[in-house]
Structure formats: structure tokens, C-alpha cells
Amino acid sequence: MSRGDDLDRWLDGHRGELLRQLIDWVRIPSISADPEHTADVRRSAEFLAAAAGEAGFPRAELWETAGHPAVFAERMEDPRLPTVLIYAHHDVQPADPLDEWTSPPFEPVVVEGELRGRGVVDDKQNVCMHLEAVRAHLAVVGRMPVNLRLLVEGEEESGSAHFEDLIRSRRSELAADLAVISDTGMLGPESPALTIGLRGLVYWEVRVAGPAHDLHSGLYGGTVANPVLGLATLLAGLHDGEGRVAVPGFYEAVRVPGAAERQEMARIPFDEAGFLAAAEVPGPSGERGWSTLERRTVRPTLDVCGIWGGYAGAGAKTIIPARCGVKLSARIVPDQDPDVIADLVRRHLLDRAPAGLTTTVEVVSRGRWVSAPPDHPALGAAGRAVEAVWGRAPSLVREGGSIPPVAAIAAELGLACVLFGVGLPDDRFHAPNERLRLEQLHRGTRAAVRLWDELGTLGAAGLGRPAGPASPG
């Protein structure tokens, strides 16, 4: 029996423990965007630090920031081995709207092979997957084939506002040969994938104010500017009839994929029908001339994420609302600059602000896109690890989501990043009834075990470390 078989057998025998740990963690509502859950985010960090220590990390501690705490853990086996930095996050999205959940979001339940609850897949499963892989190696082999440093932040779902300051201040402790980012997914249960690109993100909040207080629409209707109508007009001008963003200069720096790249993307086993069915929509929409897969990965977007204003309760209330607002997000692609896009959209909105009203535009957050080299040796190692478990080579895909810390890790720490996660498109990320297919968790854990073996075999030199015995840091 091979070492891989021994490790798999150990993992299969401890599935119940892994599930219980994940359930206990998901019960902590670590919503970083909501100040009412500040204490819960800290509890989540404390839970993870304890779990990392129990898994076999001799050093496991909270790293404070000006916001929510991150967790750092370290296991250094041998300075001659490769050192890998694992990045993930322990905070979660708000659970709203609560009335659309079939079970309470922070009381996770197992239904038909799925674990349901907020944070089960984004991103607590990926962290537990890595901790279990460490436990397996130590139980079966007695040591790790690589050195590991684990950094799990508590603000990813609210913009990672303090992440760059954190890694700059802890640069020496985060030194590594490679970063493994576990906050991504696959194409389907039988369609494994590794991500080689992420879109960037810019987020704005726009507020439009009119009278000092709500006015009677019978007395003032038709005589003063209505903030909600003004905002609606402003939003209607953000796109043209072809589905393109109408902000001047928005597409100026976009790297347009060539014919060969588009042909390669067309060969990816992307289930468009299943993708749309998971959203329960009648058909695709968006920028004309591009496929659904292209629109969600290599083309930029500008979306309304939330809007408020006026009366929305039962029955009628005849008013001119005093104020209203909207939250906007853009997903940006190579070679768009988030600072440039943030300013272009801000100026576009202010230049077209409706007369008789006061319009303000705040840039809430911004993050760069990521594009990884598809021929990096570590990506080949990850591909072999995934193929050993799924029985087929993973597709190399670009994802539509954004993880600003990935760009920060690459820029500030100088590390190549392998994006290694096992979520599925229909896992309802950020939506009610978020779910994790347990078989995907167990397959991912087996793949993580093999990833450390593959990287250990590749060695530090294979990852580009200069000759010499010293491990980074």
C-alpha cells in the first residue's frame, strides 16, 4: 500500500472529526462588515488559533490589526524544505435576507450530503481542509514534507482594509517560497480546475440628498427634485444598449483576449446551462459579443449591489423622499488600474449628478486583478495533486471573483501564488442557503495532502529558491 493510500485511509477514518470542527466554527457568526459582530470575529480567530495548535502548528496566534484580528500559524520542519504560505480568511458575509434561508445560517445542518450554513464554503471549509491535511501527515508520516505558514485574515469580506499594512509589518515572518491561496473553486464536482486569474474590485457608495426631510407628495410633487428619481436616472446612464459600461475611458486599458485564448476558453468544460439554472434565471445577460464564461472572467463589469430610499413598507405612503443611496461594484481585468477606474466612475457620476440635489460618491475599497503564469512549477505540482484525486487533469481557469490580498501577497512579499480551492459554482457563495458538498471537502483534503508531497518533491530549488541551506525567514 502506498503512502497516499495510508493517508487517504487515515482521512477517511477521521471524517466525523473534521465535520464536527467545521460545524463548531461555522456556528460563530464572524461577519466582519457588521460592527455588532466584532466580538464574534475575534471568537472566530481564537477558535482557529486553537484548532491550528491542535492540528500540529507549534506557533499559532492572533495578529492584531486596526480592525479585526488575523490568525498566524507556523510549522517549520527543516530549513532545507520549501516554505509555503497559505492564505485564507475566517470572516463571512452577512446572512441577509434571513427569511430566504431554509435553516438558520449559523446553525449548520447536514442535508443530503451537504453542509448548509453561512461560511461553510466561503471560506472555512478550505482552512479546515488544510488543517486536516497537516493532521494526516503528522499522524501517518510523523512530519511534514514542507514548512508551512498560515495566514487567515478577518476582513476579506469587508474589503481587507488593513491587510497590506499587516503583511508589510510582518514581512520577515511571512517569508516563503510560494503562496497557496485557498479561496477559489472548481467548475463542477467532476470538473476539477485550478484558477490562474482573478478580477479586481472597486466599490463605491453613492448618496443623493434633496429636502431636509420627507415631503408630502401632494404638496411638493412636481415642484422639487426627487432624490430617488434623480438616482434612477443616474444609474440608467451607466450602461448602453449593448450592455457595455458607458463611463468614458472605462475600457481603455482592458487587455482583450486574442483569438487563440478565446478558443482555449471555449474548450473549458463550463456548464452554462447549469450555471444559469443555479441562479434560477431564464437566460444570460450582459455585454454583447462575449460568451457567458468570458463575461464572468475576462470582461469588466459595473453592477448595482444595493439600493435604498423612500418608503418600502406595506401599503402606501405618499412622500418625496429626503435621501437615497446605492452601492456599486466593478470587477476589473488586466490591465485596468483600480485607482483609475475608481476615479473615472466617481467623476462620471458627479459630472452627471441631477440638478437640485446633492450627490456624494465615496470609494469604499479597491483591489487589483491577478494573473498567474500557467507554466509555474508549483501550478504543475497542484495539477498533479488534483489529478491524483479526481482522476483527470484540472482545467486552468480564470475566475470572476476578486481576492485583493492575492495581489498584495504577490506585490509585497514577492511570491508566486497558486490558487487552490474546491468550492463549486452553485454553492451559493454570498447568498442564502450557502452549502458545501461534503464529498468535495473530503476530496479537497486528499488533494491538499498530495499537494504538500508534490511540493516537497519539487523542493525549494524547484520553486526558485537560490542555492543555500537557509529557509526564508
Image (cartoon, grey):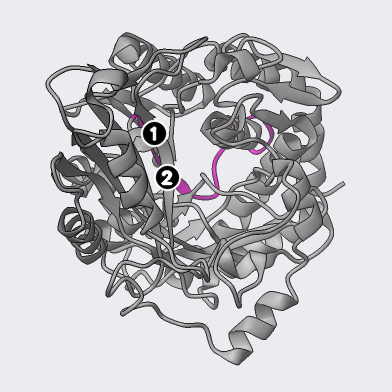
Q: Is residue 102 above or below residue 149?
A: above
| Residue situated in front as seen by the camera: 28 or 280 | 280
Residue 246 is at least partly visible in this image: yes
Contact (CB < 8 A) between labels 2 and 1? yes
Magenta span contains residue 228: no
Q: Position of residue 84 (x, y in %)?
A: 43, 51
Give the magenta part as a residue range: 138-154
Residue 449 image label: none
How dense is the environment of label 1, judged by Cα within 10 Å: few (below 14), some, or many (20 and up)? some
Residue in the picture at 16% in, 42% down: 359
**Which residue is disc 1 drawn over?**
307
Element on which disc 2 rests: strand
Asked where in the image residue 149 lies, by quadrant, the reply is: top left
Q: Is residue 22 left or right of residue 352?
A: right
Residue type of the residue flagged with mark 2: Val
How dense is the environment of label 2, judged by Cα within 10 Å: few (below 14), some, or many (20 and up)? some
Element on which disc 1 rests: strand
| Residue situated in front as seen by the camera: 356 or 146 | 356
Q: Is residue 192 left or right of residue 24?
A: right
Q: Is residue 43 above or below residue 371?
A: above
Residue in the picture at 51% in, 44% down: 183
Magenta span contains residue 143: yes
Q: Is residue 341 left or right of residue 87?
A: left
Residue 148 is at least partly visible in this image: no
**Which residue is disc 2 drawn over?**
304
Residue in the picture at 55% in, 57% down: 456
